[in-house]
Image: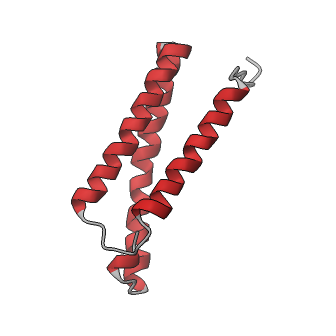
Amino acid sequence: MSGQVHIEVSLWFWFGFIIFVVLMLGLDLFVVNRKAHVVKLKEALGWVGVWVFLALVFNLGVWRFEGSGKALEFLTAYLVEYSLSVDNLFVFLLIFGYFHIPKNFEH
């Protein structure tokens, strides 16, 4: 094994993927959160659901085009990264608490 990974993905896929990511970030930053507000639990859970749903749809695409092995690799990596991101929330809470950041600016 040479340690190299060979991935064949069309240029159109990358173009579409980048456009999609930019659109979703724009939606999140400039439409949904254009005004500072306190994020309620229901809203936060709704957005978590949206992002997890999109990741699972992407995983279905990986399964369809690359097979079950690659889909399982993606899903495993997604779950590991998702669980590791939770500890970052505690760091943010500590920082926001230390600097007394108002709740409406904690998004």
Residue nearest the observer in this picture, 4 or 42: 42
Residue located 54% across and 48% down the image: 23
Image-based side of 89 in relation to 63, left or right:
left
Name above or below for residue 34 compared with residue 74.
below
The C terminus sits in image quarter: bottom left
Q: Residue at x 51, y 22 (%)?
A: 62
Q: Name the one closer to the observer, 76 or 2.
A: 76
Indicate the quadrant containing the N terminus: top left, top right, bottom left or bottom right.
top right
Number of dots carrying numbers: 0
Which residue lies at the image location 56% right of the left edge and 41% below the top edge?
A: 20
Q: In this image, 7 relative to 20: left or right?
A: right
Give the camera-side residue of 16 and 89.
16
Nearer to me, 83 or 59: 59
Q: In which quarter of the image is residue 40?
A: bottom left
Instruction: State whether residue 79 is above or below residue 37.
Output: above
Residue at 49% across / 22% down in the picture? 61
Q: Residue furthest left?
A: 42
Q: Position of residue 58 (x, y in %)?
A: 47, 29
Instruction: Give residue 101's position: percent from left, percent from top.
Output: 40, 83
